[in-house]
Amino acid sequence: MNDPCWPAPSAHSDGLFQTREAAGSPTSPPAVQSPRYSLFPGTSPPAPAVSRARVEQRVVYPQPKALIPSRKDVLVLTPWLAPIVWEGTFNVDLLNQQFRLRNVTIGLTVFAIKKYVVFLKLFLETAEEHFMVGHPVNYYIFTDRPADVPRVPLRDGRRVVVLQVPAAKRWQDVSMRRMEMLSSFCEQRFRHEVDFLVCTDVDMRFRDHVGVEILSSLFGTLHPGFYQASREAFTYERRPQSQAYIPRDQGDFYYLGGFFGGSVSEVHQLTTACHQAMMADWASGIEAVWHDESHLNKYLLDHKPTKVLSPEYLWDESLLGWPPVLKKLRFVAVPKNHQEIRNR
């Protein structure tokens, strides 16, 4: 008997990739019922009239004070005027209301290749508890082991889409091919189904709220090991022969490769550019020091993100403890043996 929260999958082919879908409810509507529109100026359809009832239901919240900063202990705005998201800098109820009015759908992508599939159950269970609660979500799971994807009960309006992809011999190759696959699916599928993409590592669990406060045209996340470091200490690619090269006198932040995203069009541009840069490096016989993360940092240096997430959004408490500057730990590493998992 099929689990009512995970109907029998229907399989179809997207070129080299096999897909399988599961919805949060047997009566859930198809993912795409009408054309999607961008949420950014110049491309949105005319906004519908707001009824008096809708106005009366607006969230009541404290008035912001122009002379009282939301946080005094951290940087909350970049030099290019992008917000840096920390606990205490946003009102989640107000943001949820605004995003519900826009009727957005969020796609969450993860790669569960080889033994990394073992992390999916905890990842999905905790995502259902903390990730974009109250909003439609598509979980896009790239894996070479579709039969091992666990069946997890889903909220209404949320579904799992399994995308079968080939494995790779080295974990570094899995990491670098991620950009190619994301670029391909942005064009083939994601742009028709979701408004925003959030691209994360799978060997993690959600521990606290991660919601629409992160959404923006293009966002990156401060690496937990470098958010206090000077640019000279960043582990950028320092060899001029690489397309990911960043000189020691340049750099804003060091962004991690395990949590980035934005609108589908912006993620498509980012992943396409990074894939092309990696192919250029391959043709030159060089591999960037931190693989796709090195190329991500080069891209975000040249194409400034419109929002930056604090290390609350990816942290490893076993390695770094819990410093007072972090009011919440939202998305945290799962303890593991890296060598055991990566090489099998």
Image: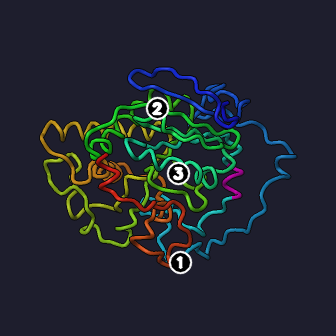
- The residue under label 3 is 123
Q: Which mark is residue 72?
A: 1
Q: Is residue 100 visible?
A: yes
Residue extent of the magenta highlight? 93-98
Residue 260: percent from left, percent from top: 44, 50
- The residue under label 2 is 163
Q: Is residue 309 left or right of residue 291?
A: right
What is the C-alpha distance between the residues marked 3 and 2?
Answer: 17 Å
Q: Earlier in the sequence, mark 1 or mark 3?
A: 1
Is residue 297 rendered magenta in the image?
A: no
Q: Main secondary structure of the magenta part?
A: helix
Residue 332: percent from left, percent from top: 48, 62
Q: Residue visible at 42% across and 37% down?
A: 143
What is the C-alpha distance between the residues marked 1 and 3?
Answer: 33 Å
Three-letter amino acid code of the residue under disc 3: Phe
Mark 1 closeness class: few <14, some 14–19, many ≥20 residues within 10 Å: few
